[in-house]
Amino acid sequence: MQNRSANFSSPEWLTIPFQQKHKICYDRLIDILLSFTKVMRLPSMNQRGVTLRNSIHRIHDLSTARKADIEERAMALLAQLQSWWLEFREEHYGIMALGPKCPSTPEAADIAVASVSTLLPLSGPWMVANSETLAASMVSIYSASHIILHTILFIISLSRPPNVMGLEGQSAVDTHQAAISAYATSVFDASLYLDMINPFCGDAVRASFSINIVSQFALEDSQRDEARQLLNRWNVWSRGSPHFSEST
């Protein structure tokens, strides 16, 4: 994954194909994802051979003012994702509700989204009960997007004194570390469901992006190892796979 402006993030690509076709929830999520590099303006953007992972790790060496700017942009994108999640819940309320094949209340139905740092337990038995492969793909991409943003905020937090506490009494470092772990788990839950269903419509392929993100950005060795095992099993290693080697 390179740190380059997305080819399909231009206003024309985001609007013209949808002049006679309403954007579904999936389209709106992809719009947010496509805007990442343009909005964030990370170090070494559009430089040949520079990966997204390398650019994010270079944030640590930036000035305090530049870090503050990146932090503000990351929080703005988190707010967009939060708004999208509320729309997703509203559109999928019926399938997320308790059903006859769903013996326990879906965790996602009880989510409180008081702030952009709220950890969302995204997966639930509703996906299995309703064979929601596209919804699982969206949950996977949404969670991967959070992993990217919380990794950025985690690195920025490491540059600050350790006694800086967040809104809930946790240090910012701990908050973002917990978020990365939780969203990685969400990616696995959605991806393993797709792996189990093996849909013909390509939803499992969509989830490979999210697994790639976990393989590169998860802080826990066990999560990175699990992601690489999934990639091996799905045979979706891209050319230039050194991005996933031990050296990363």
Image: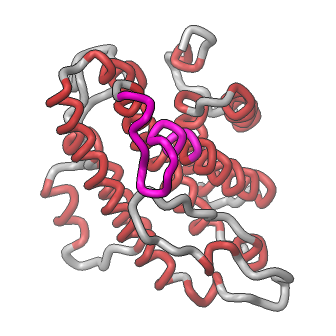
Q: Is residue 177 visible?
A: yes
The extreme top residue here reads: 247
Residue under the point 62% across and 33% down = 236
Q: How many marks?
A: 0
Q: Is residue 1 visible?
A: no
Q: Position of residue 2 (x, y in %)?
A: 35, 26
- Decide: is 174 above or below 75: above
Q: Position of residue 204 (x, y in %)?
A: 64, 52
Range covered by the magenta-colored residues: 161-178
Magenta: main secondary structure equals loop
Q: Which of the pair 170/185 is nearer the observer?
A: 170
Using the rendered view, name the quadrant where residue 53 is placed: top left
Q: Is residue 159 magenta?
A: no
Q: In the visual, does 172 lie left or right of 207?
A: left
Quarter of the image that includes the N terminus: top left
Residue under the point 38% across and 21% down = 57
Using the rendered view, name the quadrant where residue 65 is placed: top left
Q: Which of the pair 73/232 is nearer the observer?
A: 73
Q: In the visual, does 62 lie left or right of 184?
A: left
Q: Position of residue 67 (x, y in %)?
A: 23, 31
Quarter of the image that includes the C terminus: top right
Q: Position of residue 86 (x, y in %)?
A: 43, 76
Residue under the point 37% across and 28% down = 161
- Decide: is 117 above or below 113: above
- Decide: is 20 above or below 124: below
How is the structure coloured here?
A: secondary structure
The extreme front residue here reads: 163
Residue under the point 18% across and 21% down = 63
